[in-house]
Amino acid sequence: MTAVMIAYYVLSAFLLALLGANFVREKKSRNDLVLYLLVMIPLILRLLRVK
Amino acid sequence: MKREVLLKAGLAAGLAALLVWGGLPLYRHRHFDLPIVEGPGVSGVVRLKAYSPGLAGTMADTAVFVLRGREPGGKAILLGDTHANEPEGLLATLIFIENAVVDKGTLYIIPVFNNSASRNTRPGDGYPLYFEVPTDWGSVRFRMGNRDASPLDQWPDPDVYIHYPERQLLSYIDIRNVNRTWPGRPGGPLMERVTYGAMEIMRREKVDVAVDMHGAETMFPVTNCIVAPERSVKIATLAALTVKAAEGFEDHVEPSPAGFRGLSHREIGDHSGTMPFLLEAPIPFLDQPTGPKTTKLLMDGKDPFLLSLAGKKKLFVPYDAAGWSMERRVGQHCSVVLEILRQFSRKNPDKAVVIRGVPRYADIVKHGVGHYFSDPAKADAEKVVRN
């Protein structure tokens, strides 16, 4: 795995953590909750090395 | 508060279920290994990392089958699955591996040249994950791959791909396309390491002929042809004329453009003493204006939209209700490879490559591709290579 590839994995993990934090903090909007989860999908699949 | 927690837990559980439902088939596809039975002519199997150490431990490493003849002679290399969504090349190389006996010379065969791409898919285009080839003893399941390597193995893509060593600017995605990364380099991006490995086979083993087998859209002008650079064009022309006269199918010759870099038919000849050829067979599955991308369309090549376009003369190949079946495509590749080797051997008797046991176009159309495959369950376990 190259250094730039590792950096992109770290970036993905960071974005996933941000989305997760926003998901936990969200109190009002059900739409936003769903939206956070949908945006997480490609990041989780990449970090798990599925797709 | 309790209601909010329940809602979030429910949504998170839904996400987890969606990930398992969607992700598990993709995970299984990526880790599905194809059993390849070594035929009577196979004298050894090595990994490409032996020629390109940068491939060690990666999904791009792949098997190289070596078929040494009884007598010394010339050397040839056959490549399949350069584009893993064009499986006629893969199936043709497997027919050679399982059936060919080399009397003179040596044959190197890499059936899954882009191993990473063969474990990738194109869900946005509705590609099937697998396809099956019927045989006399059941059926064989193959991974249906993609044109480009998986981003799991080579990521990120650049904004523009700068070809090495010519520095030509190419589409960003072609950095994962092994037919744009020739001649490659040992420490470059993963796909460059793949092509470097093949170049090293050709340079170290002094390979005389390289044949890279593909499929191309019926609406694409470079289809149903042999692409050859200047040094290969005489042999290609003789092969094209011979198969047309003797076997009744068209396969014209296209010149390899000198200004388009990274392709096997250009870079192999420019960076080694090997004579390259690239074969294209028409594959309706890849055309855009077709019905659903089903395994049936992949295998029989029958599509009503293409038939309508053929009536309007919009295709570059003859097309009728019979479609363009896998048997025809694989049969063409086998016959053209045999003919290229025969013509090369006639011109260079001291470097002849003499092969027997490989069926030709008419045999494959009559009996089917699977007729020439052995059952891995009944083969000696030591003779089954999983790739």
Image: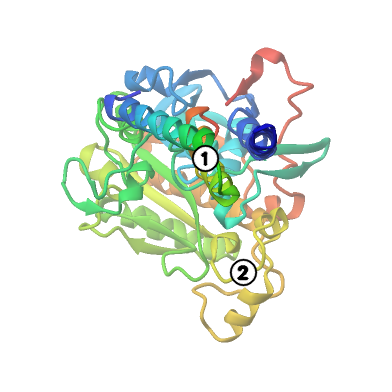
Between circles 2 and 1, the one closer to the viewer is: 1
- Give the alpha-carbon distance from disc 2 to disc 1, as whole Å: 45 Å
Instruction: Name the disc covering residue A26, or none.
Output: 1
Which residue occupies the extreme right position in the image? B137
Q: Quadrant of residue B94?
A: top right
Q: Residues within 10 Å of mark 2 (few under 14, many from 20)?
A: some
The answer for which chain carries disc 2 is B
Instruction: Name the disc covering residue B294, or none.
Output: none
Q: Is residue B154 visible?
A: yes
Given the image, on which type of amino acid does mark 1 rest? Answer: Glu
The answer for which chain carries disc 1 is A
Disc 2 with disc 1 on a shared chain? no
Image vertical order of residue B112 relative to residue B234, above or below:
above
Instruction: Name the disc covering residue B290, or none.
Output: 2
The x, y position of residue B295, in whole percent, is: 70, 53
Q: Nearer the viewer, residue B96 or A36?
A: A36
Q: Residues within 10 Å of mark 1 (few under 14, many from 20)?
A: some
Q: Nearer the viewer, residue B43 or B94?
A: B94
Q: Residue at x 59, y 80 (%)?
A: B310
- Report the side of B255 relative to B323 (left or right): left
The x, y position of residue B271, in whole percent, is: 22, 39
